[in-house]
């Protein structure tokens, strides 16, 4: 009941605030179904300069999931009300195990001199995020959180993460960046009543990227017990890195130790994954290899991958040899030949011939890219370390994207679970823009435009426009239109910082920045060439 009241209040506050401050808004409708999420539903998002909100509802495994959220930006404070995701991160989290806590309640954020504060009061629960809708469930006792970050100097920071509930968490530490590309951090405290300590260091240079760390978490450690799902933590020594002795050669390596806390009658699970690999390229030829070893519940699996690729004009060839073995069965081998030909800049065809266990199979695919429609059928080879009987698996990957009139975007995609199951997602979205600042061409308004202009275009690697991308220029955020264009007007000339804010996209799907300038010049010339930002859709 309390969670439902929070959601109702959040929506009411947003409606009152949005009506009072209505100038530039972006509305985004989403909906769809997915076998991977075992869910179907729909949602609505609204964004503006100083507020954003969303609401969603759907069914997951036959259970109704709802959610609502409002974020309001004031001169010195940020207020959040409703369902939110709080990153319970530490600077020692170098290996992808950062925890996210789902909250339902009120969050206040502010900055006082050199310290930023984040305070929360409400309930914890389980969040649900999908391309179709967002929502969450809340349960458990009343919970309070208080996070701080203090910049003693530009290179030295202090941090503290505190959660007060049925089981308390309090972890504090220090982060030091002695020079560019290096970081040393340390953290210690208790998590849900159990001792925790971690030390980490990272180095980024032209020749070497290196992350090392040691974590003493214990089998029963969790960052929060307040209604959150179990999350994997690291334990013991961990290292990952990439060494590039020349511009055409690189070696990668890693060793990571994971622990899943006990649940019910299930004891804590410990797993270790080791890998080493390398590649070499000269002109249009490249070769590489990788070796894997994983251990789970005293069962060990090992695998190796050897490959060579050659580009012959429009034709690309690749040969793969895979071999895997476990302590419970014989070794398995397979060899595949992949050929891909680019018939035109927007059309390619693909053929994969595989020989395994005395049998030969042939699969076909390809891609088609258009202004309104794009499709791709390809084949991916995965190493699944926690399936020792058959760790190497080849899976079909299908992606369909359809841009209809009126900013309606439909997406169909398949993916592959670690258990070897193919899942699909079908989602649709439509974005609507209100007033200026969001269109490619300024429309007539009853106010004066600033005379200095920064403009640009957001595209895919194939040159197709990407709409709904969030571009922060200076302190303002702008969105690309259906043709990929965006513009920002500034009061003064000069160069302004440019940042692609992936977390604030109104476009459906996940994106990776391929290339983007770090800054841009504001000019009076409306015909001056704009900046180009290239994004890749996952």
Image: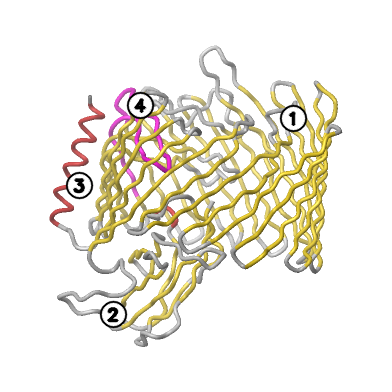
Q: Which mark is first along the chain, 4 or 1?
A: 4
Q: Which numbered circle lies on residue 14?
A: 3
Q: Find residue 202 and report its horizontal and vertical position in percent.
A: 63, 52
The local secondary structure at tag 4 comes to loop
Q: Which residue is drawn at 33% across and 66% down?
A: 476
Task: State the separation of the CA atoms marked 2 and 1.
Answer: 61 Å
Front of the two marks 1 and 4: 1
The relative height of residue 8 versus residue 15 in the rendered view (above or below) is above
Query: Would you say the residues marked 2 and 1 are in contact, meaning their CB atoms lie under 8 Å apart?
Result: no
Would you call the spot at circle 2 few (<14 residues within 10 Å), some (14-19), or many (20 or more)? few
Task: State the separation of the CA atoms marked 2 and 3.
Answer: 30 Å
> Where does label 1 land, which residue?
390
> Where does label 4 land, which residue?
165
Instruction: Give yes or no for residue 131 being in the magenta stretch.
Output: yes
Q: Residue at x 55, y 60 (%)?
A: 369
Name of the residue lying farthest toward the top:
265
Name the one closer to the observer, 112 or 137: 137
> Where does label 2 land, which residue?
491
The local secondary structure at tag 2 comes to loop
Q: Which mark is first along the chain, 3 or 4?
A: 3
């Amino acid at each position: 009941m309390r969670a439902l009241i929070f959601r109702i209040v959040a929506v009411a506050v947003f409606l009152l605030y949005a009506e009072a401050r209505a100038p530039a808004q972006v509305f985004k409708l989403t909906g769809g179904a997915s076998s991977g999420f075992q869910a179907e539903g729909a949602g609505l998002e609204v964004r503006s300069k100083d507020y954003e909100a969303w609401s969603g509802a759907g069914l997951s495994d036959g259970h109704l999931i709802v959610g609502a959220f409002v974020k309001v930006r004031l001169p010195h404070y940020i207020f959040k009300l409703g369902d939110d995701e709080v990153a319970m991160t530490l600077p020692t989290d170098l290996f992808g195990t950062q925890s996210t806590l789902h909250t339902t309640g009120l969050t206040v954020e502010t900055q006082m001199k050199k310290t930023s504060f984040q305070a929360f009061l409400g309930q914890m629960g389980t969040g649900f995020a999908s391309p179709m809708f967002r929502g969450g469930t809340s349960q458990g006792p009343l919970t309070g959180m208080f996070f701080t970050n203090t910049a003693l100097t530009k290179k030295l920071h202090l941090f503290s993460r505190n959660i007060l509930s049925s089981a308390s968490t309090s972890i504090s530490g220090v982060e030091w960046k002695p020079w560019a590309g290096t970081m040393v951090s340390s953290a210690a405290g208790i998590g849900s009543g159990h001792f925790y300590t971690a030390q980490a260091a990272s180095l980024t240079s032209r020749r070497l990227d290196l992350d090392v760390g040691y974590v003493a978490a214990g089998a029963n450690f969790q960052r929060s017990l307040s209604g959150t799902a179990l999350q994997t933590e690291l334990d013991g020594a961990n290292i990952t890195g990439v060494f590039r002795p020349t511009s055409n050669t690189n070696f990668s390596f890693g060793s990571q130790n994971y622990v899943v806390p006990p649940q019910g009658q299930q004891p804590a699970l410990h797993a270790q994954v080791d890998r080493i690999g390398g590649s070499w390229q000269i002109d249009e030829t490249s070769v590489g290899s990788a070796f894997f070893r994983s251990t789970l519940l005293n069962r060990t699996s090992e695998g190796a991958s050897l490959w060579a690729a050659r580009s012959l004009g429009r034709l690309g060839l690749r040969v793969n040899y895979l071999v895997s073995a476990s302590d419970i069965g014989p070794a398995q081998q397979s060899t595949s030949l992949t050929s891909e030909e680019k018939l035109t800049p927007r059309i390619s065809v693909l053929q994969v011939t595989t020989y395994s266990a005395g049998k030969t199979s042939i699969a076909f695919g390809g891609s088609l890219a258009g202004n309104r429609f794009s499709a791709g059928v390809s084949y991916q080879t995965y190493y699944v370390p926690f399936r020792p009987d058959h760790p190497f698996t080849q899976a079909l990957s299908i992606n369909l994207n359809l841009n209809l009139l009126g900013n309606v975007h439909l997406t169909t995609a398949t993916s592959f679970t670690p258990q070897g199951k193919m899942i699909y997602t079908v989602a649709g979205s439509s974005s609507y823009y209100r007033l200026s600042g969001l269109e490619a061409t300024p429309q007539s308004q009853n106010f004066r435009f600033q005379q200095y202009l920064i403009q640009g275009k957001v595209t895919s690697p194939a040159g197709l426009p990407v709409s709904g991308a969030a571009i922060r220029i200076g302190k303002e955020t702008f969105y690309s239109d259906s043709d990929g264009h965006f513009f920002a007007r500034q009061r003064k000339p000069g160069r302004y910082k440019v940042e692609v804010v992936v977390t604030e996209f109104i476009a459906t799907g996940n994106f990776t920045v391929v290339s983007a300038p770090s800054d841009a010049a504001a000019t009076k010339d409306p015909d001056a060439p704009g900046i180009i930002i290239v994004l890749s859709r996952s």
